[in-house]
Amino acid sequence: MLFTWSSKDLCIIFRQWRVTGPFSLFVSLVVIVLLTAGYEGVRKLTRRYEAMHGRRLSAFTAVTGSDTRRALEHRGKVVLALLYAVQVFYSFFIMLLFMTYNGSVMLAVAVGAFVGYLVFGEDTTAAKTVACH
């Protein structure tokens, strides 16, 4: 694979996702921006669930060790693990988009991250990393 700006014979992740002309390139880039922005939405959803779960658990402080609290902890941990798995899958999918080594696709990923942060990034204390997950 070599870095290129050409959209000729550009296949994006799936065999069926091929760029056949200027219109399909434009639509593909818009979809990539939306997909990448959606990653920030999933992160925001996870942060909100985590905060809500913490508030629910703190309501049980007076009754420590209760079966209800343990069940709530377990259910919360399972949901958080599921949300984490979705984030990891999503981030690797974005990495695959970037690994097309096409400059337009790479820019669309960066624009999507920008848009996603503008739309969903209200929590400025969240760590921003460039890792795959």
Image (tube, helix red, strand yellow):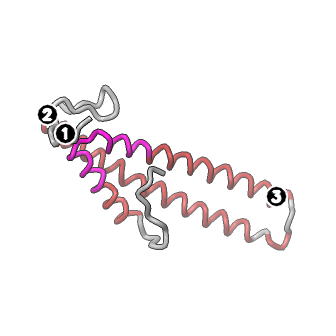
Closer to the chain start, of discs 3 and 1, is 1
User: Where is residue 122 drawn, in percent x and y?
Assistant: 43, 70
- Check disc 1 and give the amino acid type: Leu
Q: Do the residues labelled 2 and 3 touch (CB within 8 Å)?
A: no
Magenta span: chief secondary structure: helix
- Badge 2, how many Cα within 10 Å: few under 14, some, many 20+? few
SS for callout 2:
loop
Please say if 12 is above or below 109.
Answer: above
Given residues 48 and 129, the one toward you in this image is: 129
Disc 1 designates what residue? Answer: 25
Query: Cα distance, mark 3 to mark 1?
Result: 53 Å
Numbered range of the magenta stretch: 92-111
SS for callout 3:
helix
- Check disc 2 and give the amino acid type: Gly
Q: Is residue 84 left or right of residue 91?
A: right
- Badge 1, how many Cα within 10 Å: few under 14, some, many 20+? some
Q: Which residue is drawn at 18% across and 43% down?
A: 26
Name, please, the residue furthest toward the top.
Answer: 15
User: Where is residue 6 drawn, in percent x and y?
Assistant: 14, 38
Residue 10: name its quadrant: top left
Q: Label for residue 67? A: none
Residue 1: name its quadrant: top left
Disc 3 designates what residue? Answer: 68
Q: In this view, does 104 lie to the left or right of 118?
A: left
User: Where is residue 98 drawn, in percent x and y?
Assistant: 32, 45
Q: Nearer the viewer, mark 2 or mark 3?
A: 2
Q: Which of marks 3 and 1 is in front?
A: 1
Disc 2 designates what residue? Answer: 21
- Check disc 3 and give the amino acid type: Thr
User: Where is residue 84 drawn, in percent x and y?
Assistant: 56, 51
Query: Cα distance, mark 2 to mark 3?
Result: 58 Å
Q: Which residue is drawn at 55% across and 63% down?
A: 48
